[in-house]
Image (tube, rainbow, N blue to C red):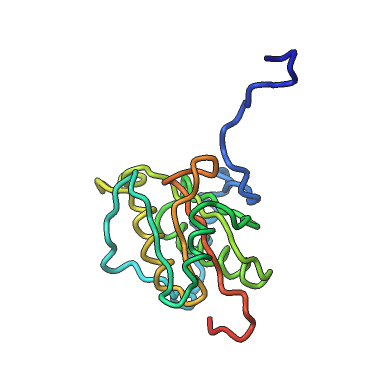
Amino acid sequence: MEAAGIRRLKVNRAQTGRPRRNELNTGARREAAEQAPPQVQSKLSDGGVEAVTPHQRLEFSIPDLPQRTFAQLKKGHIAWEGGLDLHGYTLDEARVELESFINDAIAARARCVLVVHGKARGYRGSGADYPVIKSHVNGWLKNWSRVLAFCSANEVDGGTGALYVLLRTRADASS
């Protein structure tokens, strides 16, 4: 295969464009967060999450989204312009990162982004027997007015461990 100009990939992961979090700063960040005054409450709720299975395909679209646009999203025909990998985050950290990332993407007028939530059951001793981050991301995105649609990604971009998220880019849309 080498002679034909073909070489085996060393890494089979999507490059999301955002660096993974630095584990060395975790203790310092936790200490700073505990000492910081309470901030404005997140718009994303944790209540009443619908548990999903690791290999379940997720789909959502607002009622007035053209079916053709949603079909293009599901086929991966709309190029994603940025990505976020939530592997290794706690639920609270994932919520903050997702909210920040989506707000940044909207400010940059990105139409489609990739969110990698993973498929692992529970997280760091949560005891949950379902993919906690995946389930919560599913609920959070459905409640976000600037999210037009989302669906599980194609295998090359993470399959059922990632989502293509279509964002409202019109400036007159409400947040």
The x, y position of residue 132, in whole percent, is 33, 52
Tally the numbered discs.
0
Front residue of 26 and 124: 124
Measuring 48% from the left and 78% from the top, which residue is drawn there?
40
Measuring 65% from the left and 66% from the top, which residue is drawn there?
110
Residue 117 vertical placement versus 4 (above, below)? below
Front residue of 112 and 144: 112
Q: Residue furthest front?
A: 68
Locate residue 62 relative to residue 165 in the image: left or right. Answer: left
The x, y position of residue 164, in whole percent, is 51, 56
The x, y position of residue 79, in whole percent, is 63, 55
Locate residue 18 relative to residue 95 in the image: left or right. Answer: right
Front residue of 148 and 129: 148
Residue 141 vertical placement versus 31 (above, below)? below
Residue 136 vertical placement versus 108 (above, below)? above
> Which quarter of the picture shows residue 58?
bottom left
The x, y position of residue 70, in whole percent, is 49, 63
> Which quarter of the picture shows residue 108?
bottom right
Locate residue 69 relative to residue 52 in the image: left or right. Answer: right
Q: For the N terminus, which image quadrant? A: top right
